[in-house]
Image (cartoon, coloured by chain):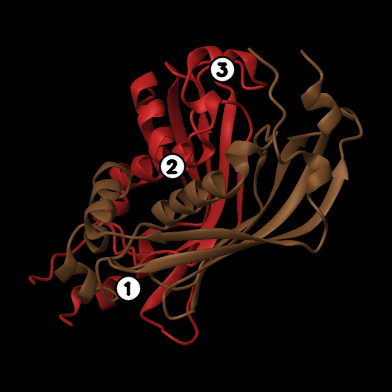
Chain colours: A brown, B red
Amino acid sequence: MTAKMKTWAYEDFVEGASLDLGSKLVSAAEIVEFATEFDPQPMHLDEEAGRASILGGLAASGWHTCSMFMRMLCDAFLLDSTCQGAPGVDQVKWKKPVLAGDKLTGTLLVVAKRLSKSKPQLGLVTMRSELFNQRGESVFELENSVMFLTRDAAGRPA
Amino acid sequence: MTAKMKTWAYEDFVEGASLDLGSKLVSAAEIVEFATEFDPQPMHLDEEAGRASILGGLAASGWHTCSMFMRMLCDAFLLDSTCQGAPGVDQVKWKKPVLAGDKLTGTLLVVAKRLSKSKPQLGLVTMRSELFNQRGESVFELENSVMFLTRDAAGRPA
């Protein structure tokens, strides 16, 4: 493998900074495809069942919303970063239904950062992310900490 | 719609009870398919890149593990329940990599339950779930609260 310098290393995340996560149009076909494989509850499979549920329409599985958020994160900066994965998620809030035809936009706030004590080439960045629908309503919140290599560690050949 | 009595209503969850979530074999093709759509980081797309990463092999996206867990939950009892969705997730831990060829098994513990104060036909069941690989190692933990209709509310036509 060739060592390629990534744009986003640990040092490039600034506490208090906010990042744009772009946008994502959610289609009925995608909702049904995801639900068929991972969450085949009626309100995620069928428009009529969705309308009859408390979600009020054909609604994305909460895990589908998480997954679409992840793709937005990847496209916004994660694929061009020194990301080393994440140990988990501190909290997910599914605040409002994500319905077929919705257009999601997202923002990410850098809440905190710290270098690992045991592995000084690795830092943990705590992020609070939020997705909104086309009416500006907050539909999703997530907080977690993601591991990034430092710029030095990423530039040094393994 | 015909009112069909579901096996699992709010009353059927007993604090301290544990439920079997069955098993799930994780294929390389599924890992790559999910990652291509939702989390195209190299360690989720390519065996060699996975081996070079801290995950040690072609590894499922953490969101893929969440989604596979959701399907195990659906098949174990959720599709035959009065489930009304969930407001979110309190915590997810990706404890060890889930690699191509792994066989996951799962258990769920009913931690607590309470009726909604504002909607007495609805109860909230707090669950702690865990997935293990074929070596018995705990790879995933999740805690959240899920809404279920009471048996009376579910049996009563809308």
Q: Residue at x 30, y 47 (%)?
A: A34
Give the answer, above or below, for where A135 lies relative to B1.
below
Q: In terms of secondary structure, where does tag 2 sit?
A: helix
Mark 3 and mark 1, same subunit? no
Give the answer, above or below, for where B97 lies relative to A147.
above
In the displayed structure image, the side of residue B136 where residue B35 appears, left or right: left
**Image position, residue B49 (x, y; %):** 56, 17
The picture quadrant where one finds residue A146 is top right
Residue that label 3 marks: B49
Residue that label 1 marks: A55
Give the answer, above or below, for where B73 lies relative to B47.
below
- From this viewpoint, which residue is outermost toward the left? B2
**Image position, residue A58 (x, y; %):** 25, 66
Q: Residue at x 51, y 24 (%)?
A: B59
Chain letter for mark 2, please. Answer: B
Q: Are the residues at dot 1 and dot 2 in contact (C-beta closer than 8 Å)? A: no
Residue type indicated by callout 2: Phe
Residue type indicated by callout 3: Ala
Q: In terms of secondary structure, where does tag 1 sit?
A: loop
Mark 1 and mark 2, same subunit? no
Q: Residue at x 59, y 13 (%)?
A: B51
